[in-house]
Image (cartoon, rainbow, N blue to C red):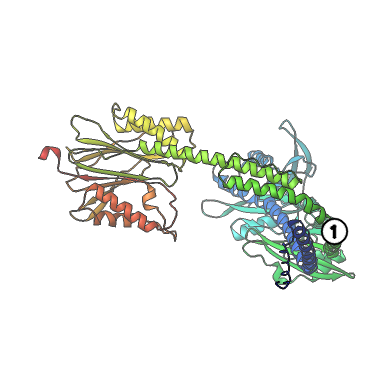
Amino acid sequence: MNPIVPAPPTTAPVAHGLSFRTKLVLGVCGLVLLTGAVVLWLAHRSTRTSTEALTGAVFREVSARAATHTHAFVLRAAPVVESLVQLADNGLAVTDHDRIAAQLLAVLRANPGLSWVSYGDEAGTFTGAYRTPEGTLRINHSRIVAGKTKLVEYDVLPSGGRKVFKTDDDSGYDPRTRPFYVRAKALGRLVWLPPYVFYNQGVPGISCADPVKDGTGAVRGVLSVDFDLNALSDFVSGLSVSAHSHVFLFTADGSLLAHPDHRGVGASGARDSGKILTLADVGDPLVDAYRANLRPEYLTAAAGDDFHRFEFRHADTDYLGSVTTFRVGDDLVWAVAVVAPKSDFVGDVWRTQVFALVAAALAVLAAVVLAFALANIVSRPVSALIGFMQRVGGGDLEAKAEFGGSREFRQLADALNRMIADLRDRLRLRHSLGIAMEVQQRLLPTAAPVVRGLDVAGHSTYCDETGGDYYDFLVLDKAAPNAVLVALGDVMGHGVAAALVMAGVRAVLRDRAVVAGDLADLMGRLNRLISADHGGDRFMTMHLSVIDSKTGTMRWVSAGHDPVIVYDPADGSFAEVGEGDLPLGVMDDTQYREQTSAAFPPGRILFIGTDGVWEMPNATGEQFGKDRLRDVIRASAAGSADSIAAAVREHLTTFRGDAKSVDDVTFVVIKMGPPVGAE
């Protein structure tokens, strides 16, 4: 008997990896926990950075808006006053006070933002039209008689008439002593004045003035356009960067221009005794603290707006301040000031951060709980997704995705179904484009024409499936083929739209070329066709020429096309022939001119091409250029027209390298032979 041998130990079952469901639960929980930790760390780290960026952006935006509005508000005066000065010698009645009043009133009405338009002369006579704060239009006449200023003001009635508003036997006003007159006369050019109080009105304003000169250059008077600065105060009252912010405008020397709570006049006075407030006159401790922290270099305007932001402390509160300076003309520097408590920004950021931290913690907790439920929901649609992708990968483009499950998977199914439908459409479109390319290629000549005394070759390559370049040859007399009509055109753009234009032009050209009276009439017909069909939205350059081997001449018409490059191998020189008119489709009534060249001797080479030849770029952006083209023609001139064309194609391909072609390339080469009658 054999001894009993114990059985071998049983092999342990192979342990399988974790299931997709388990991996999904662990992965989602781990990812959410990691993401939450990173978000919390980044939120804490970026608090200061985000505050600075937010504050700077808001301050800069409000400052830029105020500066832009102020620019637009005041700088519109310069063109008005310059136009009036130009009219002083031709139409502006500077010596007729009634007429100039009507003219200035018309200018005021046409510019609602202006407060005053006026003219004062060397005799002290003043005429002005102005707009009251209530919107009433008035005319102001004053003249100095025996040392006294006689004043009459009129209300302008809605009917256009005038009614006396007030008179004054001695208003004391002399325009020659006013700031606008004195400064404009002294500098002899257009000037902007610092803010001042309008005479006897108590209104702060700014003036743009320009002297009117006689034929000798002497000042006859000064034209002025004025603004009421109270409008700027109304504007800045609507600007803010936060709940407790302040925005105001001032000049570089500290004069107040606009403030939401203070008007610019400290004392309106009588006549010319008004006073403009300065920042020191406002009596606002916050403005004083802001002013104390302004550095002198902040108040110098560069070529554009100059923005500076700084921090300061006032009344145990931290504040953020900014100043944006800009120039008004060549003479003035204005500034936009923005002030806000720092807590307006930091407080919101901290509250937002705390809210984000709480939300993140809740999201992490919810994600851990929902991950288990999500695993069950996701695992079933995933299997369906795998099966769907396998069917599509196998070429079944009629497959339809139906995953069920959560909304995201239903959206994914819809997106995949749309993608497959789009893919089917793209395949159909590619097939259609292939047919279109084949049809268009058949519209081009399949071979060069046989013309006695001429050696002809042509070529066209499109950068897309279809293009807008076109060339054609027509032998006008089949019985005695001594001349050929050459047509070469370039439609704006390329692709299907350009190809349709090209096809239409070819049809008309082929239909009318034989019966056309001359080339100019034929070009005019093509122009009217494109103008009528496309309404100026598309245009096309076109070269039409008839090369006659009997006479050795070329008759041509050019619609904006590049000239013909002519090479004379006898002396190695190049010339360009083909001065042209407007492209087709620009204007429907363009008259085109037919021209005739001198006779070309045998061996002369004509090259007609589109700009895609010399403008072809290489990988560095450098263009092929006409110099390289001339070198190729010169080097291959001994060969046939077809060999010259082949050389041009070869050099273009080599030059372009791996760069993408960006335009169609089309050209025709004609080499002149002996005149037909010379054999």
Q: Is residue 589 visible?
A: no
Residue 43 in view here: yes
Label 1 secondary element: helix
Taking 172 as reference, is 217 left or right? left
Vertical placement of residue 614 versus 676, above or below: below
Q: Look at the picture and state if 350 lies above or below 165.
A: below
Toward the viewer: 462 or 543?
Answer: 462
Frontmost residue, 333 versus 240: 240
- Say which residue label 1 marks: 359
Which residue is most to the left? 679
Q: Is residue 37 left or right of residue 224?
A: right
Name the kind of residue labelled 1 in the image: Ala
Question: Which quadrant: the C terminus?
Answer: top left
Q: Nearer the viewer, residue 396 or 357?
A: 396
Q: How far across and how far down the image is residue 225, in percent?
A: 67, 49
Please state, as top left, top right, bottom left or bottom right, where the N terminus lies in the image. Answer: bottom right
Q: Residues within 10 Å of mark 1 (few under 14, many from 20)?
A: few
Q: In this orientation, which residue lies closer to the viewer: 610 or 127?
A: 610
Left or right? Give the position of 301 relative to 158. Answer: left
Q: Is 254 rendered above or below residue 589?
A: below
Q: Is residue 155 above or below residue 326?
A: above
Residue furthest out toward the right: 316
Instruction: Tell me where residue 562 appears, x and y as whole percent.
Output: 35, 46
